[in-house]
C-alpha cells in the first residue's frame, strides 16, 4: 500500500469522533447552554459548531478527579450543612437530657474511684484481722504482701499502665 492509505485511515479515525453541537448535545443528553458552560470551563472544541466527543469525554472524566472551584464550594457547603445539623442534634440531645455534663461524670468517677481505693486498701487489714488469731506473724506478713500488691496496682493504674500482678517466685531454702 502507498503512504496515502495509512494516513487516510488515521484521518478517518480522527474524524469519526467529531460531532456537531446538536449531535454532541444529543450524545451527552444535555442542553446547548450546558455544552456552552462546559466550553467556558475548559471543554475542548474543534471548531465553531464542532466537538471532538472523545476529547470532551476525557475532559469530563478528568474533571471528576480535578474538581472545579464550583464543585468544591458545593461540597464544602454540603459538609457545613451536615456539621450544623449534627451540632443541632447534639444541642437537642442536651436539652432533652440525653447527655450528662462532663463535670458530673468526672465528679461521680472521682467519688467511685476514691471509694474503690479505700476498699482495696482495707483488704490487707481485713486479712490480717482474720489470720491474727491463728498466727500473728503470718497475719502481718500477709497484710504487708496484700498492701504492697494493692499499692503497686493503684500506682500503675494511676500512671496509665496496665497492672500485671506478678507473683513473687518462691525460692527454695
Image (tube, helix red, strand yellow):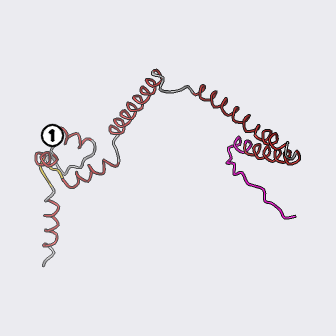
Q: Which residue is mark 1?
A: 31
Q: Which residues are magenta?
A: 154-173
Answer above or below: position of 53 versus 76. below
Q: Main secondary structure of the magenta part?
A: loop
* Residue farthest along the bottom direction in this orientation: 1
Residue 44: percent from left, percent from top: 24, 49
Answer above or below: position of 159 versus 103. below
Find out whether residue 170 is within the magenta segment. Answer: yes
Image-quadrant location for residue 69: top left
Q: Image quadrant for the C terminus?
A: bottom right
* Viewer-closest of 10 and 58: 58
* Residue farthest along the front direction in this orientation: 134
Residue 110: percent from left, percent from top: 67, 30
Residue 54: percent from left, percent from top: 20, 55
Q: Image quadrant for the N terminus?
A: bottom left
At mark 1, the secondary structure is loop
Q: Is residue 19 left or right of residue 126?
A: left
Q: Is residue 136 left or right of residue 38?
A: right
* Viewer-closest of 19 and 130: 130
Q: Is residue 44 left or right of residue 73?
A: left
Find out whether residue 117 is within the magenta segment. Answer: no
* Viewer-closest of 164 and 72: 164
Q: Which residue is found at the position 48% from the left and 23% from the top?
A: 97
Q: Is residue 69 left or right of residue 123?
A: left
- Disc tally is 1
Residue 115: percent from left, percent from top: 70, 32
* Viewer-closest of 114 and 145: 145
Amino acid at each position: 500500500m502507498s503512504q496515502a492509505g495509512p494516513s487516510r485511515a488515521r484521518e478517518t479515525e480522527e474524524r469519526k469522533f467529531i460531532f456537531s453541537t446538536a449531535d454532541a448535545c444529543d450524545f451527552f443528553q444535555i442542553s446547548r447552554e450546558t455544552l456552552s458552560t462546559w466550553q467556558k470551563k475548559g471543554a475542548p472544541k474543534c471548531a465553531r459548531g464542532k466537538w471532538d466527543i472523545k476529547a470532551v469525554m476525557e475532559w469530563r472524566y478528568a474533571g471528576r478527579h480535578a474538581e472545579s472551584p464550583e464543585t468544591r464550594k458545593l461540597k464544602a457547603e454540603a459538609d457545613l450543612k451536615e456539621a450544623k445539623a449534627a451540632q443541632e442534634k447534639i444541642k437537642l440531645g442536651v436539652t432533652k437530657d440525653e447527655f450528662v455534663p462532663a463535670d458530673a461524670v468526672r465528679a461521680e468517677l472521682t467519688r467511685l474511684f476514691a471509694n474503690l481505693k479505700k476498699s482495696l486498701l482495707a483488704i490487707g487489714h481485713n486479712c490480717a484481722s482474720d489470720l491474727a488469731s491463728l498466727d500473728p506473724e503470718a497475719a502481718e506478713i500477709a497484710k504487708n504482701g496484700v498492701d504492697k500488691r494493692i499499692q503497686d496496682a493503684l500506682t500503675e493504674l494511676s500512671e496509665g499502665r496496665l497492672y500485671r500482678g506478678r507473683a513473687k517466685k518462691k525460692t527454695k531454702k
